[in-house]
Amino acid sequence: MGAGQTVAVFGAYGHTGRFVVAELLERGFVPVLAGRDADALREFAASSPGLRTRTATVDDPASLDRALAGAAAVINCAGPFATTAAPVIEAALRAGIPYVDVAAEIEANLDTFARFAEPARAAGVAVVPAMAFFGGLGDLLVTAAMGDRTSADEAHVAYGLSSWHPTAGTRTAGAVSRQRRDGRHVRFRDGRLEYRDDAPPTLEWTFPEPLGARSVIGDFTMADVVTVPSHLAVPEVRTYMAVEAARDLAASDTPSPAAVDERGRSAQTFLVDVVVRSGDVERRAVASGRDIYAVSAPLAVEAVDRVLTGRTRTVGVASAGAMFDAPDFLRALSAHLSVTLP
C-alpha cells in the first residue's frame, strides 16, 4: 500500500487532518505534518512518536516548498480553501507531486478547475479537488450510477445525515462562501450555476431503508455541482439535505463533533442516495456509513494511493469520477462505506 512513501498533510492538526494522518499511518505511508501553527504541530506530533513537522504558511511560498520537500504527494486539509488551495497547488506543481484536497467550498473548487487545468496538465501532475465526503463521494456515486454513459438528463444527490455538528473549519469555510456569493444560495440548472435570493424549498425524499421518506432542503448545494459537471454532460445536478442536519448547521450553538469511539469518530451516521435519470430510465447508487469528516480520510488517502500507483484515467485537474474507476474505488472503501451500485 503506502510502502513507506512520504505524504505531506497541510493542516494536519485540524479535525479532518487528524483523520487523514491516522489513515496514512494505517496504510503504511509516512505523513509529514504541515501547517501554520508550530505549537499545534508539535502537540499533535507528540501523540505519535516519529512524526515530523514542518511549519508553513500560504503567504510564504518558500515555506511551502520546504514543507513539500521529499514528499511523494500532498493532501490539503486546511480551510478555507479559497485561501489555501491555490498556494498549495502551486507548491505541488513546483515540486512535481500530486495534490489532493478535501474542499467542500463550491467557489474554491471552481477556482481550482479554472486556474490550474492547463498548468497541471502541462506539468503532468494530478490535481484532485473536493476528494472528500462532499464533492468526491457524490461524484463517484453519480459516475458509478451512469455506468458506461457520459450524459444524462439529471442527477440527484440526497444527503440523509442523522445530524451535523460542524467543525470550526466548516463554519469558517461556510462564512467565506456566503460572503463570496453575497448570501445567495446556488443551484445547477441548464448546465450552469445560478445564484438565487429566494429561500430553498423544503421537499420530501424517499431514501432507501432504514431512512425512508424524509423532509429535505432542496438546492442545499454542495461541491457536487462542480465535480459532476466537470466531466459528465448532466445539465441538472440537484442536491438535497436532511432537514435535521441543515438545522444543526444553521444553529450557532450546535457543538463541534464529539468522539465516541477509539478511532475518534462521532455518533453521526449518513446515507447518500444518488439517482441519475435519462428519459424514463433511472439508475441508483447508495452509500452509507458513519461520520462525514472521518470518511473523508479514506477517500483522500485512497486517491493518493491510486495516483501514486498509476491507477488513474487522466492527468491535470480532475474530479474523483474522472480521475478514477468509480465502482472499483467505491468497492475499495468497503471497510468505511456500505455501497450499493447498479
Image (tube, rainbow, N blue to C red):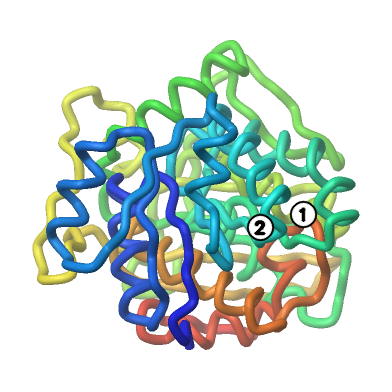
Query: Which labelled disc corresponds to residue 244?
Result: none
Q: Locate residue 145, reporting x and y percent.
A: 69, 75
Q: Residue 279: in sight, yes or no?
A: yes
x 51%, y 86%: residue? 332
Q: Quadrant of the C terminus?
A: bottom right
Q: Position of residue 128 (x, y in %)?
A: 66, 57
Q: Mark 2 highlights which residue?
A: 128
Residue 67 to residue 144: above or below: above
Q: Amino acid at mark 1?
A: Val
- Above or below 168: residue 276: below
Q: Quadrant of residue 209?
A: bottom left
Q: Are marks 2 and 1 in contact (CB under 8 Å)?
A: yes
The location of residue 236, given as percent across then percent down, is: 77, 48
**Residue at 55 percent of width and 80 percent of height:** 330
Q: Nearer the viewer, residue 322 or 342?
A: 322
Tell me: 319 left or right of 219. Answer: right
Q: Is residue 268 left or right of residue 325?
A: left
Residue position for label 1: 317
The reply to whether residue 219 is in sight is: no
Callout 1 crowding tier (Cα within 10 Å): few <14, some 14–19, many ≥20: many
In front of the other: 37 or 210: 37
Q: Earlier in the sequence, mark 2 or mark 1?
A: 2
Give the Cα distance between marks 2 and 1.
6 Å
The residue tagged with tag 1: helix, strand or loop?
strand
Residue visible at 72% across and 50% down in the picture: 93
